[in-house]
Image (spheres, coloured by chain):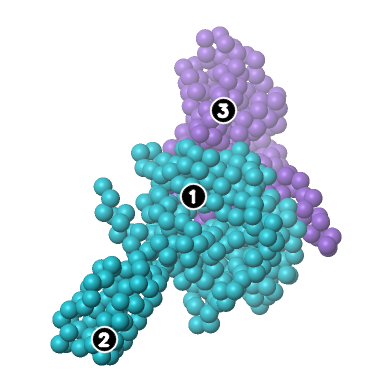
Chain colours: A purple, B cyan
Amino acid sequence: MTTATTAAASRSGAGRALALAAVEVRTVLRNRTTAVTSIVVPTGLGLFWAVTVGAPDPEGATAVVALQLAVVLAMSVYVTATQTLVARRQARVLKRMQTTSLSDTEVLIGTLAPCLVLGIAQLAVFAVVDVAAGVPLPVDVLPLVVAVVGGLALVVTAAVATSIVTPSPERAQITTLPLVFVLLGGAFVLSVAPVGTVWQALVVVPGAAVGQLAQLAMTGTTWGPGLGGVPAVLPALAATAVWPVVLGAAARRRFRWDPRH
Amino acid sequence: MQTTSRTRATGPAVARSEAAVVVRDLHVHFGDFAAVRGIDLDVRRGEVFALLGTNGAGKTTTLEVLEGFRRRTRGTVSVLGLDPAVDRAALQRRIGVQLQDGGFVDELTVQETLALWQQLVERPDRPERLLARFELCGRRDVPVGKLSGGEKRRLDLALAVWGSPELVVLDEPTTGLDPESRRRTWDAIQELQEAGRTVVLTTHYLEEAEALADRVAIMHAGRVAVAGTLGEIVSARPAGFSATLPAELAEIPALTGRVERTGDRVRVHTPDLQGDLTRFLGWAAERGVRLADLRAAPASLADVYHAVRAESEELP
């Protein structure tokens, strides 16, 4: 038996998921349409906002950070992940992967991990560009970290849930629109609306908490009073935690691995 | 087309006596629709078992239950001693699966697809062996999306037999293939059996089941209508003989079988081929009748298949 064959047999579940993720990255890079929609467009938007809006105006800087975060979550991760899942299901690749030694969870991780890595890489690029463009650093970085981690959890579970009602990759451009609009709009409004106003109720909208958390991070008012005297960060944390759980539960119940039936 | 030998190696006798698959009272419902309605199946180790049936008969759903991909509504299922609904991960290490279609990442080349399999499947094997066995060496750098239908099915089969699994499940392995590609697939399936592997396959092609299968089950509308060896299935159905008679002979002897007469042509369907044929030949000899175009044959699998369909469609 060759070294290669014994190495294959002894590969761990994480190693197998990583192998699948590497293939997904290769596929994205070879597919120009996917590369443009998931990499070029969001990156271009983020850079445009940083250069034209950001810099000295603190409110504008907050909006830029929130929009950059929202566009990466919505377009680079959510839309791409939904399209990828649906395309792989329609082509029966998910079903094929289930015939390997991968567990169902590992198949999903391997399939979706590149979208997550892509999103994180874009955020890193935006961070560098923002600093170069004069956007001030966040006063309290913790809400921003929560916004990134919670936002990624939200859009990944939303992608799996959206795939349930999406029969083809083309239809994903339609089925993902509601959350994309809600996420971008909610995040923008909550990033500029004064804390403690009625606008803060928008935090219950999926993804809007990202804007609220970005504002708190940039202004350093994380534990300041919000609507009804409750610290503004608490409703945002609750929304960030609850939506992935709700969407994940829906996905777990109804997710389909196969286009049949 | 080159025919495939019906003489097959059958693997060790001890292994063949063990059950690879046991299914009892399997039901699968999708909402109100019953795709599988109480089937029993037994597949022995080392045999090739063919599930025949029309589209929508429940073949693929049954396979998906055996593979652990589909939950059953009722019944018991054992595959290699494991319950697929409970032990799918353990089962996947021991079975190879060929899907009915698709399942490839079109952007990957053949070589990359096999290399991925090497990383994803615990059973050890070598891409080079399978490239050579399935005559894909010249296509190794071609993206899978650009392969012909026959080449894709060969790659599909290569993935299914990766690491020589104990049980290979093939869902319509030759659908859409040209005769040469079909023959190659049959050869590969026979090699599996000669190596003592168990094969469960579905097919629309009766000649495929006749050429490959030790035992057959014919499904229709979610039920197994008949099952057994080809000999058992065929012998349970009326055989037949036919001949052309001189026009002046209006009467023929009383026979146990059913007689159809079309002009000078007589066709007899009978459960007692030997007895009826003897009476018929005796009658002809007494009258000095020369029987033009005399033909006698047992029922074929095609006869059984069509009879099953007809009988099932008559049921309420």
Say whether marks 1 and 3 touch (CB < 8 Å).
no
Say whether marks 3 and 2 touch (CB < 8 Å).
no
Q: Which residue, given by chain and number where applicable, does mark 1 sit on? A: B62
Mark 3: few, some, or many residues within 10 Å (few <14, many ≥20)? some
Task: Name the residue nearer the viewer: A152 or A200.
Answer: A152
Task: Name the residue nearer the viewer: B189 or B282.
Answer: B282
| Residue for point 56% across, 71% down | B186
Q: Is residue A87 left or right of residue B29?
A: right
Task: Name the residue nearer the viewer: A10 or A75.
Answer: A10
Three-letter code for the amino acid on which mark 2 is drawn: Glu
| Residue for point 77% across, 53% down | A9
From the viewer's perspective, is the residue at label 1 or at label 3 nearer?
1
Distance from disc 3 to disc 2, alpha carbons, whole Å, reads 89 Å
Q: Residue A6 occupies which quadrant of the picture?
A: bottom right
Three-letter code for the amino acid on which mark 1 is drawn: Thr
Q: Is residue A245 left or right of residue B220?
A: right
Percent x, y of residue A163: 49, 43
Q: Which residue, given by chain and number where applicable, does mark 3 sit on? A: A245
Q: Is residue A207 above or below residue B276?
A: above
Chain of the residue under label 2: B
Distance from disc 2 to disc 1, alpha carbons, whole Å, reads 56 Å
Percent x, y of residue B46: 64, 60
Q: Secondary structure at mark 3?
A: helix
Q: Is residue B173 above or below residue B40?
A: below
| Residue for point 41% across, 44% down | B37
Q: Which residue, given by chain and number where applicable, does mark 2 sit on? A: B286
Can you see residue A163?
A: no
